[in-house]
Image: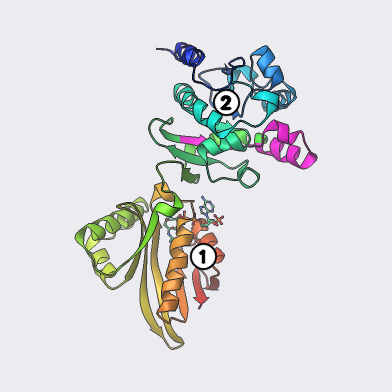
Amino acid sequence: MNKVLELENLKQEMINDKNLQLKTNLVFGEGNPDCQVLFIGEAPGAMEDELVRPFVGRSGQLLRKNIRELGWKEEEVYITNIVKRRPPENRDPLPEEIEAYRPYLARQIEIIAPKIIIPLGRFSMNFFLPEAKISRDQGKLFKVALSAGEAGGYWHVAPMFHPSAALRGNTMMKAFTDSFKKLPTMLKTIKGDTNIRMTSQSTNPKMETVKIKKITRFDKKILARVNELFLEWWAKRKYKVSSEYFKKFIKKSQLLLICDGEKIVGVLTMVKIHKLSGEGFFIEHLMIDENYRGRGLGKLLMSHAIKLAKNQRAQKIFLTCGKKNKIGHSLYKKMGFKVEEVNFYSLGL
Ligand SMILES: CC(C)(COP(=O)(O)OP(=O)(O)OC[C@H]1O[C@@H](n2cnc3c(N)ncnc32)[C@H](O)[C@@H]1OP(=O)(O)O)[C@@H](O)C(=O)NCCC(=O)NCCS
């Protein structure tokens, strides 16, 4: 079935769904179903309800002007909202309204399958990134994993301010237009898709479901999984490391694991060292599963390692970090480590 027909069927289904909240006109969305870029706002306003078209009021004009200023045509992209009927008095959509319309938006996304999704405003952003903050995260590119049934799979998402927020003041307007100008570069970045911050809604753990375990006994399953995490990483960098080396190494280390249920998704290994200056620990390896990065788990593991070292009366923690590993350097500085020599860090406890 072609996309136009699939979207038309979905629209009919929504019209026939008598349980769906709000009773004004259904503003389904418009644009090219084969688009690269999908814009998603919150809900239609008065003008949108009247004309049965999304983003046609003052905010809509601003959105459309910015699209044209990129040299694109409005008809090339697709524009819609989460909640597809106007809430009374233009109030914010209620959580239960968002929930009711959510499965339909998910199916609309699946049909259109855009290269990049631009949620406009925090309601729409929270559909993909429940923990994000619009003022902090607008204009950033995320790779989001959604579980099956909710437009399952990976999507590239770059939240932006809602144009109505941009209309409220110069600072917001500047942020809005600056983020908009990044869109063509973002599309290029997606083609390479390497350094994009990975986050996810439902396939990743919520923070409280993530457990840190300190391992003292090494069963085969743990060794196998830890090996897998590190060997994959090294293999990508063309290092040759045997799993035998790793087994031996792990046995003399203290291991901290982050687990999502049964799955080990993060590892930190540290060994006790004796220096003339006193007792300390050397953090040898730190690895977060690729699908779980950028959610604070690295920081979490490091802070547990620091606590553990303090409890064992260590006076310092040392570690090294590869020259090109920008994320590693940033993480260690955030944790209070100081550079002692090039790529060599220490933290006094
Ligand atoms: C380095 C690594 C452990 C970080 O773990 P993580 O869970 O992704 O990191 P966190 O979410 O806790 O973020 C920690 C800090 O790292 C930086 N960071 C994380 N992801 C980033 C990204 N995509 N781009 C830029 N900085 C990033 C930020 O400074 C972040 O702090 P902030 O969120 O306050 O801005 C992880 O990326 C990893 O396993 N990398 C591969 C192995 C590796 O490099 N190990 C370290 C060897 S020295």
Find residue 318 and report its image quarter.
bottom left
Q: Nearer the viewer, mark 2 or mark 1?
A: 2
Q: Say which residue appears at 61% left-offset and 34% top-offset.
A: 183
Residue 234 vs 42, above or below: the answer is below
Asked whether 30 or 341 is in front, the reply is 30
- Identify the disc placed on residue 166: none
The x and y percentages for residue 234 are: 34, 56
Queried on whether the Cβ of the residue with tag 1 lies below 8 angstroms from ligand 1, the answer reads yes
Please, what secondary structure does the residue beneath circle 2 have?
loop
Q: Is residue 254 left or right of residue 100?
A: left
Find residue 227 and report its image quarter.
bottom left
| Residue annotated with mark 2 | 83
Q: Is residue 175 left or right of residue 107?
A: right
Residue farthest to the front?
Answer: 19
The x and y percentages for residue 195 are: 49, 46
The x and y percentages for residue 326 are: 52, 57
Q: Which residues are magenta?
A: 155-179
- Residue type, mark 1 in image: Tyr
